[in-house]
Amino acid sequence: MLGKCLKHEWVETWFIGLACCASVILVSVLIMFILPTFPKLADSDVGVYVLPILILTLTIIGIAAVAGALFIGKYFFFYRYYKNLFTDQGYLMHTLPVETQDLVHSKLIVALIWQYLLAISYGVAIFFGSIGVYGLFNDDFTDYYDFLNGLREVFGFVFDVGKPEIALFALCMLLYPIMDMLFCFLAVAIGQLGKKNRFVLAICALVGISFVQRFAMNIVSAVSAVLNIFFGINFRMDTVEDVTAQYDIMLVLFLIIEVVAIVGAYLWNMHLVKNKLNLE
Amino acid sequence: MDQFGQNSFNTDGYGNPANEPGNTAGYGNPVSEPGNAAGYGNPVSEPGNMAGYGNPAMGQGNPAGYGNPVPGQNPQDRPFMSADLNRGPRLPVFNEPMQRQGEVALLECRNLTKRYMPNRPAALEDINLYIEPGHIVGLLGPNGSGKTTLIKLANGLLQPTSGEILVYGKKPGPASKSIISYLPERTYVDAQNTVAKLVDFFADMYQDFDENRAMQMLAALGINPTERLKTLSKGTREKVQLILVMSRDAGLYILDEPIAGVDPAARDYIIRTMLNNYNPHASILISTHLISDIENILDDAVFIRYGHIFGQCSAERIHKDLNMSIDAYFREVFAC
């Protein structure tokens, strides 16, 4: 039945996910095409008046698209989990002939698919946006190649630290949305235990959980630096090796925290949904 | 204790247990008892019973009310009366649990207790209930008596504090949910969806869902399947939900206030729908306050109060022995 749950969850959510991804990409494409016209516009008579307005408008649209997609992409699934399982609709969902796990898994999988697609959309948007920015003053993209080279100089060390570190980093990045979404689900499951204002309680629970998670991550950063000392590596991190060692410890600890958080949030959430369901 | 391991009535500790001497039948004075000619049990249409249901306690020839103990009889030997609860006039409280016919009951509660908070009174306490296939059972009781809690437990929406509830011998889970067709008392479908989309959803999720039957019923009630639920009136939404629920060939239909929000004309259609569309080997458990509307289709009635099974019997028992409607009986037994 997981397949059927997935199908219906997808049907009910695809338009929001697609809208988030599309809005980010469309805005970046818009920027890509509009920005190169700015130099010519600046030379015109009306440019002095129009250009600031245009820049302001584009900036607002860009920020709204990026922040909006980020916000909606996360909180839509947060709210949907609440509405679909813990309000009146829960009377239908929890009496379907499916396991509770199927309900939760279908929502988690679909939400994660859109989180990853949204992340890819941001990557695509950055690509289009940067073409617009660096294609401003000439058509042969010389500036754009310079921009890419500049990026390599700044972030090149990432590629120098070694494959294990890159794999660890990628794993951390892949697990983060899972942890993040499970925190959302757990917060909703905690919030529904209340008698009134359950959604507000869920938001409060999410803020609390996020605070604990960030606090733990910061502690880990500090602890990894301290551990570095015990590994006998230069604490000042003057060399790439020093940075790599620090990076290794931090990534491993982040990974442990993420795995523990994912397992804990999942089990706690499942316990609450199965045994502490509190429909209105 | 009876064969089911519980007192046949009086589970809340009031009055005589069923097996006490002088109370073998478990109910009160029969209608034909001397001195009760004009007492409760008069059909509504009978002369001298203009009140609509049952005569009040001042009934001629029965000034003390229905079910008075015979003068001189040991009070402990008299049958259990609703008046033993210090509420309302005296009426017999039947307690005749459905007899187990097969190996496995359709719905079975064994010492079922549900307590929402540890130090608060139980919403349901020590409930023992059997529902066999082929019965239409009314789950009746005043507000806050525990009806919805019992229904939620049967549907796996709540977990029992102690005891167990079984559907075809299985604890609530995907298997039991595939047998139960449940209509809650609230709108439980997404109002953004069209009716047709909901029909598709039910057809996809329930193997026993009959899409053609649903479409026929929608057409009969003049409901356009392409309309979104949010554009429909509350009553029409309830009709749609009931159609979805009754379009399944389920083993047990649990309907919580199925006709509360619909007009009287539609109620008749809905009740006919219930009768025409349910599998004869299935059972329907109906919880409602609109007893008079559904009592003609009830085979059995289970009365629940303060989380206890207060009484249960066949509808025929009330109609024949008391010569009164279940609605009238309910109003008297649960009179405030």
Image (cartoon, coloured by chain):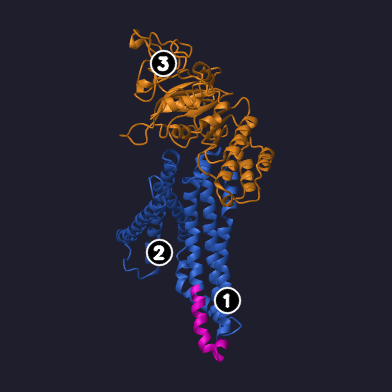
Chain colours: A blue, B orange
Q: Which quadrant holds the C terminus of chain A? A: top left
Residue lying at 55% horizontally and 30% vertically, measured from the top left: B294
Name the residue beneath numbered marker 2: A244
**Nearer to the camera, B232 or A111:** B232
- Label 2 packing within 10 angstroms: few (<14), some (14-19), many (20+): some
The residues colored magenta run A39-60
In three-dimensional space, the C-alpha distance between marks 3 and 2, rounded to whole angstroms, equals 98 Å
Residue A124 lies in what quarter of the image?
bottom right
The amino acid pointed to by label 3 is Asn
As displayed, is residue A17 above or below residue B261?
A: below
Name the residue beneath numbered marker 1: A32
- Frontmost of labels 3 and 1 is 3
1 and 2 marks in contact (CB < 8 Å)? no
The image shows residue B289 at horizontal and vertical percentages of 48, 33
Disc assigned to residue B62 = 3
- Frontmost of labels 3 and 2 is 3
Residue lying at 37% horizontally and 17% vertically, measured from the top left: B64
